[in-house]
Amino acid sequence: MIKSTLKVSLIQLDISWENPQDNYRKIEELLPASGDLDLVILPEMFTTGFSTRSKVLAETMDGKTVNWLKKTASDNHFAVCGSIIITENGEYYNRFLWVTPEGEIQFYDKRHLFTYGNEHLHFSRGTKRLTIEYLGWKILPQVCYDLRFPVWSRNRGDYDIAIYVASWPEQRSWIWEHLLIARAIENQAYVFGVNRVGVDGNNQKYDGRTLAVAPTGILLAKAKPFATERIDISVHYDDIFQWRKNFPALSDADHFKIL
């Protein structure tokens, strides 16, 4: 059964460099004290910032951050997601984690590694696209640089919401905003883009510009640039259903396979 209204919080965070404990604290301070929230979305590498020191910072799937996510979801009765550095079978991944209040975990490993920043030298590329079903909604998780590659996130009739968690620098923020809106329009889906703010250990500056976009491309919410902020938004399944019914563009889409 589909929950008709989904209540979501987008956390635009000033991430403390390579300091998970401090970032747990910051996130906890931003969470709502009470309410019937369904989902909290955190940025890319929310425990460390965008660091390529994977061998030093990597955690396991039974490590501290996964357990913190499980406790946070359970205590607050909402799902929580974001990416962290994970090691598995001798490989290192920029892994999007999805954790439900019941402790169920699904994950997506970032496919498009940012070679311009040498991410490919420190992480292994993900190979599997994932869609998550939660409260009847179908959700596509993506990580930062994935946003630039529309074929990978093309809606095959298999999702209602696309989530992009990111560490997207200020100097390219206009690209970030325009591509998020484009992904919503072309896929007739809600799009949530959750970015960080602040300055990282490489002196890279981030201005956030966390967005929520409707399937029509209309901007529903936008965080203040450079501000640590939580955006609360409600999205409605009937709105997406009616838009696709009234303007069935996806039925004219090209059919293809990713090799």
Image: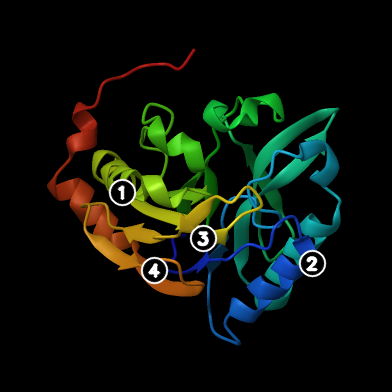
Nearest to the observer: residue 18 or residue 36: 18
Estimate how packed mark 2 is, as few (under 14), some (14 to 19) or many (20 or more) residues with alpha carbons within 10 Å.
few
Question: What amino acid type should be assigned to the residue bearing mark 2?
Answer: Gln
Question: Which quarter of the figure has residue 175?
Answer: top left
For disc 2, the marked residue is: 21
Gap in angstroms between the C-alphas marked 3 and 1 = 33 Å
Number of the label disc, if any, that sits on residue 174: 1
- Categorize mark 3 by other alpha carbons within 10 Å: few (<14), some (14-19), many (20+): few
Q: Is residue 221 visible?
A: yes
Residue 228 image position (x, y, % from top left): 51, 72
Mark positioned earlier in the residue sequence (4 or 3):
3
In three-dimensional space, the C-alpha distance between marks 4 and 3, rounded to whole angstroms, equals 26 Å
**167 over 131 or under it: above or below:** below
In the rendered image, the residue lying farthest to the front is 203
Residue at which label 4 appears: 223
From where the camera sits, is residue 160 visible?
Answer: no
- The answer to whether 211 appears left or right of 102 in the picture is left
The quarter holding residue 149 reads: top left
Within 10 Å of disc 4 (Cα), the crowding (few <14, some 14-19, many 20+) is: many
Mark 3: amino acid: Leu
Q: Earlier in the sequence, mark 2 or mark 4?
A: 2
Q: Is residue 121 left or right of residue 207?
A: right
Q: Residue at x 68, y 44 (%)?
A: 51
* Residue at 61%, 87% in the rendered image: 33
